[in-house]
């Protein structure tokens, strides 16, 4: 067990112990609620029985206040208990990630895109993906922002700012605070409701601007209704009260659709708004040294109003709006107090006062959540390196480079260097020797570097570039597309992309494998020559040794590397070590033989 695993195990154990104590305290206070209620009821009954009405009323009020205070105390204890439970779970999840047990984590499947330049080929999203390994976000805005960072390389200044921010959050003394921040949203249910869609809808609503006469009735009509009902009890005509009740009923009937729309659109956001409020209250008072983090925190305030207060207001509005769910309560509230109209009005007032601030604040919160995920990932992998960005075109200089999704205790790492435009590294190798995995290793670490995250290497210096891959092309029955044609379409996109000035780093695996060997050799060589003349460099893996001859045709621009295997008896041994030169050991014949195919004896290796 490595140091981080041991630390996470100790944290989980400590939180479990605290959780048990918190559970016992919560249970005790729960019984205290019952005692206060019963004591209040008995005390009030004794006073009323003895004819001491005033004392009875005072006791009811006093015990009610005491009961509310105990209720709040119990809610706080319950929250504390749940927080400890979630913190323990988080540390157990960190152990699972270190051990490669990723199946239970969000893979970001909704972000998968087979047409993206690299995410499908590099296992960025989906099962056993980089997103599962890194993402700690629970909210829709946090996971969306992290996915965007995976899908789009950041400018160099932004990468450097993110590295600084992540480094601060990944410090050991920050871990307690950081883990608290990560689990805050886990207290709430997060549905598919989209915050931005809700705000866009709310911005387009102008109920009281379209019906300004209703604004006066919202405040006047409930007072008149209550007054007429009170007058009725004092002997005045009840027809006045009935008239006011009828007006409220008719108004509610007339605007039933609008009332339902406001409620239906807002109620799904309640848990999300509570979650954001809780997160922001944790973030706002904290101080940071990193410029990016301090800017995020400072921008959460508008004047003296923190974003948590503004979002808390809309959560409260939605909560009161939801009282209409009770049929009996809704009838009373909406026929006497114009309840729905009141909270629609409050929602529109909130929109005018706080919507702009809240939208900007949620963008900042999304940034923080993405940074928090990167920091937790970096802290869990202290042996990973912080990459250096190079100004030398297409520089890639790595020591101890490995794949972050390979969780072997003895993970094989390789050193690799290249630089300059028009370069192609041809990687040959036998089956299962590791050449395709090496291409993915290069690509996935470039993606990590260009988003500001730590990379799986002892050291990495890399030049910013657009990563492009063509590895997993397959038949598409819906589009009536063969795997060969699908691969040609990917290569066509690559050629189009390299016509511009943006540098492109390509990773191509067994290109043109869907055609005969003669056309495959000719096409692959032609592609390398064409890419050689453009602002592009990259790696191509292949079984075809003919491509290795291009090292003589384009000396200094094409270079051969390989992965090799050895055969000992019925065993094929791999060392997964990158070597210079063309592969001279192939194992296809031996593999087929091991699978039961009777191969004719031959002096040549298969």
Image: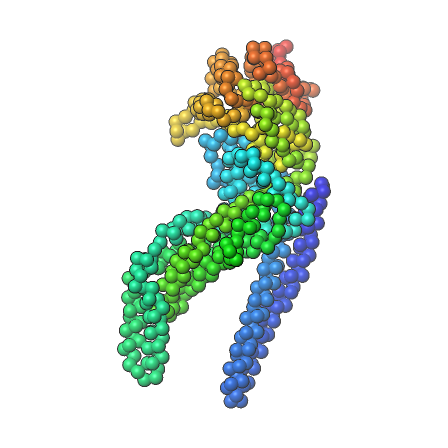
Count of numbered tags? 0
In percent of the image, x 63 and y 56: which residue is there? 84
Q: Using the image as rendered, state which of residue 604 and residue 29 is in the foreground.
A: 29
Residue furthest toward the bottom? 51
Residue 12 in picture, x, y percent from top left: 67, 51
Q: Using the image as rendered, state which of residue 469 and residue 584 is in the foreground.
A: 469
Q: Is residue 114 left or right of residue 71?
A: left
In the picture, residue 541 is in which quadrant?
Answer: top right
In percent of the image, x 39 and y 53: which residue is there? 202
* Res 206 visible: yes
* Color theme of the render: rainbow
Q: Using the image as rendered, state which of residue 513 and residue 394 is in the foreground.
A: 394
* Res 124 visible: no
Residue furthest toward the front? 303
Quadrant of the snapshot with the N terminus: top right
Q: Is residue 126 left or right of residue 346?
A: right
In percent of the image, x 41 and y 56: which residue is there? 352
Q: Is residue 175 left or right of residue 198?
A: right
Residue 430 in picture, x, y percent from top left: 61, 20
Residue 592 in picture, x, y percent from top left: 59, 20
Q: Is residue 590 above or below residue 442?
A: above
In the picture, residue 218 is in which quadrant?
Answer: bottom left
Quadrant of the snapshot with the C terminus: top right
In percent of the image, x 59 and y 66: which residue is there? 73
Residue 224 in picture, x, y percent from top left: 33, 74
Q: Is residue 385 above or below residue 203?
A: above
């Amino acid at each position: 067990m490595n140091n981080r695993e041991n630390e996470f195990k100790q944290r989980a154990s400590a939180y479990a112990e605290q959780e048990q104590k918190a559970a016992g305290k919560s249970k005790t206070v729960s019984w205290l609620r019952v005692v206060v209620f019963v004591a209040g009821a008995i005390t009030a009954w004794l006073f009323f029985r003895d004819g001491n009405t005033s004392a009875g009323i005072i006791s009811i009020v006093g015990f009610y206040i005491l009961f509310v205070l105990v209720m709040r105390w119990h809610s706080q204890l319950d929250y504390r208990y749940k927080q400890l439970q979630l913190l323990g779970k988080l540390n157990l999840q960190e152990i699972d990630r270190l051990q490669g047990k990723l199946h239970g984590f969000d893979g970001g499947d909704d972000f998968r895109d087979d047409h993206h330049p690299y995410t499908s080929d590099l296992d960025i999203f989906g099962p056993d993906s980089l997103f599962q390994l890194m993402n700690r976000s629970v909210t829709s805005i946090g996971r969306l922002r992290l996915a965007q960072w995976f899908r789009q390389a950041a400018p160099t200044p932004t990468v450097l700012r993110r590295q600084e921010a992540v480094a601060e959050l990944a410090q050991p003394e920050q871990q307690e605070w950081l883990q608290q921040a990560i689990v805050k949203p886990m207290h709430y249910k997060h549905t598919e409701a989209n915050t931005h869609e809700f705000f866009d809808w709310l911005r387009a609503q102008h109920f009281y601007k379209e019906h300004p006469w209703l604004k006066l009735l919202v405040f006047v009509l409930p007072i008149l209704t209550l007054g007429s009902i009170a007058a009725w009890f004092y002997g005045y005509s009840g027809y006045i009260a009935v008239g006011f009740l009828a007006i409220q009923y008719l108004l509610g009937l007339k605007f039933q659709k609008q009332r339902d729309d406001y409620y239906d659109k807002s109620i799904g956001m309640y848990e999300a708004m509570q979650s954001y409020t809780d997160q922001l209250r944790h973030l706002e008072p904290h101080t940071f040294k990193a410029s990016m983090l301090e800017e995020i925190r400072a921008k959460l305030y508008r004047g003296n109003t923190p974003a948590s207060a503004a979002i808390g207001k809309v959560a409260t509005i939605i909560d009161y709006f939801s009282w209409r769910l009770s049929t009996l309560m809704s009838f009373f509230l909406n026929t006497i107090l114009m309840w729905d109209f009141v909270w629609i009005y409050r929602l529109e007032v909130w929109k005018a006062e706080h919507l702009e601030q809240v939208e900007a604040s949620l963008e900042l919160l999304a940034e923080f959540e993405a940074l928090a995920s990167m920091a937790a990932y970096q802290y869990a992998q202290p042996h990973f390196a912080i990459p250096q960005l190079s100004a030398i075109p297409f520089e890639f200089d790595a020591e101890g480079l490995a794949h972050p999704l390979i969780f072997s205790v003895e993970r094989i790492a390789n050193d690799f260097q290249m630089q300059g435009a028009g370069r192609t590294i041809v990687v040959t190798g036998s089956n299962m020797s590791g050449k395709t995995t090496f291409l993915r290793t290069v690509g996935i670490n470039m993606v990590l570097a260009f988003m500001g995250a730590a990379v799986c290497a002892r050291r990495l210096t890399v030049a910013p570039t657009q990563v492009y891959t063509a590895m997993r092309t397959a038949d598409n029955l819906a589009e009536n597309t063969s795997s060969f044609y699908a691969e040609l379409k990917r290569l066509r996109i690559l050629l189009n992309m390299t016509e511009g000035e943006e540098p492109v780093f390509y990773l191509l695996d067994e290109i043109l494998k869907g055609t005969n060997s003669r056309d495959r050799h000719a096409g692959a060589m032609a592609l390398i020559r064409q890419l050689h003349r453009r602002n592009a460099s990259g790696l191509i893996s292949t079984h075809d040794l003919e491509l290795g001859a291009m090292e003589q045709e384009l000396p200094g621009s094409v270079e051969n590397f390989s992965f090799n295997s050895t055969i000992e008896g019925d065993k094929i041994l791999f060392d997964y070590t990158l070597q210079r030169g063309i592969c001279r050991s192939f194992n296809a014949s031996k593999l087929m033989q091991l699978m039961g195919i009777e191969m004719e004896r031959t002096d040549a290796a298969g």
